[in-house]
């Protein structure tokens, strides 16, 4: 993470810190632990930064525990207190020892694996566990340890969209026994906004010149359905624009081989700093997302805040993010390469429509998905379980 991004996060934290009454003292130093076993930096890591910053601004003492040294380093670079512990055998016992030594008031996890680890670590303790449901599988986790969590240590579950809330609780009766709330992801429109200078710098850095290109951002993993996007570009043949792909993950080698086999122009850039992402969002002709099991879709929201037209799968939470009427984003039938190809071709052939859609997308992102509201909701969540008072009027 670059110094400019860290400085931007600090400015946002200061701007959003409560100014009236004693809101900044709500937490009274209560330690809230955010735990992650993620082996790569991802959107959820950005969310953890925003959650921790909001907690800190209201007097809590957030701590982050990560099992991957690269992930821990990213948190520390953002000015948050992160500790790296081994994720090898005995993970639950190491977490249990940390909880005891730090007197943690509440524990937040956002992966099914981490909920299992937290369940063993907190059995017989008074540490409440909060599960931020960020599960990218078609069906909710329902193994023995997950069921045990819902009977014992789990105190509240957070869904990132109303779609996930209704679908998961509707399909999985045992999960209804735990209190549930919905907290949307948030975006800062002061940071994520159209930036021509950043766009020009990005084009120089990538050698893109003035030619149109599509942008996709996300983990290189099966649930993102890059195979559908690649097939859509193949169908467009010589009319297909270049695709710039930002992300890392287990499918990289397979996707590189597939792009070469299909003879489509795909450039892989791995993980890039958020400062460069803003330039990429501003410069792209359209942002494309083919995954259809998203619990939210933070990269889609960031692109919208940068006033870019987005083409996304009409699956998971994405219709909730972009809206159902098509004015702020193009919804495409899930897993349909032909429909994605048609949507890409139409949008690129109608630049005025694309510009209008991008402007409406930014308005929706700013209005519907406030970073301030997201942070306030997590402060209230922590307050409920740490025995602190809530923010008045929230």
Image (spheres, rainbow, N blue to C red):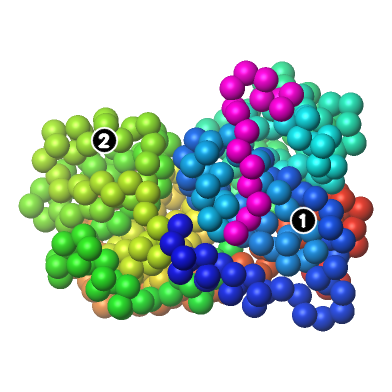
The image's mark for residue 174 is: none
* Element class at badge 2: helix
Seen at 39% across and 36% down, the residue is 249
Q: Which residue is mark 2?
A: 255
Q: Marks 1 and 2: which is nearer the front?
A: 1
Q: Which residue is mark 1?
A: 61
In the rendered image, the residue lying farthest to the bottom is 20
In the rendered image, the residue lying farthest to the left is 238
Q: Name which of mark 1 and mark 2 comes first in the sequence.
A: 1
Seen at 26% across and 46% down, the residue is 268
User: Would you identify the image quadrant in which residue 61 lies?
Assistant: bottom right
Circle 1 crowding by C-alpha within 10 Å: few under 14, some 14–19, many from 20: many
Q: Position of residue 56 (x, y in %)?
A: 73, 62
Q: Is residue 6 magenta?
A: no
Q: Position of residue 267 (x, y in %)?
A: 21, 49
- Decide: is 55 above or below 154: below
Seen at 82% across and 81% down, the residue is 20
Q: CA distance from mark 1 to mark 2?
A: 42 Å
Query: What range is drawn magenta here?
Result: 79-94
Q: Between 47 and 62, which is closer to the camera in this rendering?
A: 62
200 with respect to 170 (left or right):
left
274 with respect to 286 (left or right):
right
């Amino acid at each position: 993470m670059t110094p400019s991004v860290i400085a931007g996060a600090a400015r946002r934290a200061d701007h959003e810190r409560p100014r009236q009454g004693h809101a900044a003292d709500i937490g009274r130093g209560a330690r809230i632990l955010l735990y992650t076993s993620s082996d790569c930096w991802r959107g959820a890591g950005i969310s953890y930064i925003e959650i921790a910053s909001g907690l800190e601004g209201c007097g809590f003492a957030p701590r982050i525990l990560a099992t991957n040294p690269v992930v821990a380093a990213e948190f520390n670079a953002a000015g948050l207190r992160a500790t790296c512990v081994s994720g090898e055998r005995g993970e639950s016992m190491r977490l249990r020892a940390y909880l005891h030594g730090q007197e943690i008031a509440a524990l937040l996890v956002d992966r099914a694996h981490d909920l299992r680890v937290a369940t063993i670590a907190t059995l017989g303790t008074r540490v409440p566990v909060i599960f931020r449901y960020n599960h990218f599988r078609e069906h909710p986790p329902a193994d023995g340890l997950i069921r045990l969590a819902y009977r014992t240590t789990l105190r509240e579950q957070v869904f990132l969209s109303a779609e996930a809330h209704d679908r998961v609780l509707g399909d999985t009766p045992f999960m209804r026994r735990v209190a549930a709330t919905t907290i949307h992801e948030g975006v800062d429109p002061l940071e994520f906004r159209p930036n021509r200078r950043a766009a020009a710098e990005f084009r120089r850095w990538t050698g893109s010149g003035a030619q149109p290109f599509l942008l996709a951002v996300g983990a290189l993993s099966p649930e993102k359905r890059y195979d559908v996007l690649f097939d859509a570009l193949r169908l467009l043949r010589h009319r297909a624009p270049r695709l710039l792909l930002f992300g890392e993950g287990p499918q990289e080698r397979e996707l590189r081989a597939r792009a070469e086999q299909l003879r489509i122009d795909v450039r892989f850039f791995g993980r890039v700093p958020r400062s460069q992402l803003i330039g990429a969002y501003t410069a792209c002709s359209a942002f494309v997302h083919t995954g259809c099991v998203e619990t939210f879709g933070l990269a889609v929201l960031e692109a919208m805040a940068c006033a870019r037209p987005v083409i996304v799968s009409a699956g998971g939470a994405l219709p909730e993010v972009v809206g159902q009427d098509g004015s702020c984003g193009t919804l495409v039938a899930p897993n349909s390469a032909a429909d994605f190809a048609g949507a890409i071709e139409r949008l690129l052939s109608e630049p005025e429509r694309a510009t209008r859609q991008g402007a409406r997308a930014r308005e929706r992102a700013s209005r519907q998905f406030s970073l301030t509201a997201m942070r306030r909701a997590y402060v209230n969540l922590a307050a409920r379980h740490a025995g602190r008072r809530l923010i008045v009027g929230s």
